[in-house]
Amino acid sequence: MHSPRRLAATVFVSLDGVVESPEKWSFPYWNDEIGKFKFEETFASDALLLGRVTYEGFAAAWPSRKDPDGFADRFNTMPKYVASRTLKTLAWNNSHLIEGDLAKAVSKLKRELDGEIVVPASYQLGRTLIEHDLVDELRLVVFPVVLGAGERLFGKTSDKKPMRLVGTQTVDGDVAFLTYERVRDA
């Protein structure tokens, strides 16, 4: 049996903690460095873990895309595990529905899969995974905008969830990449 694999959640977030609909507010700040970050993250990971909303958005957009750097091919062919209580079938290539107890299923994935599992954008799923201590690394891409309204990154938790800052980077002096690691023995 494998030792548990790392699960990393990546979220685009505004300065005031909003994560909802980043396509509506993050694109004005998008640049080559953010693209490079997503490219490297995707090629370094071995599977995606998606919530229903993110899955539906990605599944509508990515299957028809082609690009010279191979990103779309990688995204389309890598294993995708989808947490949903409402979806019954998944049409996007190499997608697998997680059924039953989410925490148990993700724990099993972490034991059985090789390599890193990335949760991109699925903030509701991320909250659940953090609550169940399944997120090993939290990657925040912080955009220099205050939105004032929208779903926030964190909801209520049953207890404190200590994190340790393990990486920082700024892009063009405006966007910050912050990487936090879960502290298990605090």
Image (cartoon, rainbow, N blue to C red):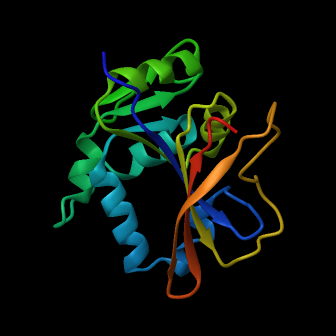
Residue 26 position by quadrant = bottom right
Q: Quadrant of residue 4?
A: top left
x, y (%) of residue 95? 35, 30
Please say whether residue 88 is visible from this viewpoint: no
x and y percentages locating residue 129 in the rendered image: 61, 33
Residue under the image location 76 percent in, 52 percent down: 151
Q: What residue do we see at 79% from left, 36% from top? A: 157
Residue 81 in the image: x percent, y percent?
41, 30
Q: Is residue 129 above or below residue 164?
A: above
The residue at the far top in this view is 100
Instruction: Tell me the residue at 44%/18% (across/down).
Output: 108
Q: Is residue 154 left or right of residue 31?
A: right
Task: Pick the quarter of the image with the N terminus.
Answer: top left
> For this rendering, which residue is in front, 97 or 3?
3
Q: Residue at x 45, y 36 (%)?
A: 49
Residue 45 visible: yes
Q: Nearer the viewer, residue 111 or 18?
A: 111
Rendered location of residue 166, percent (x, y): 53, 59
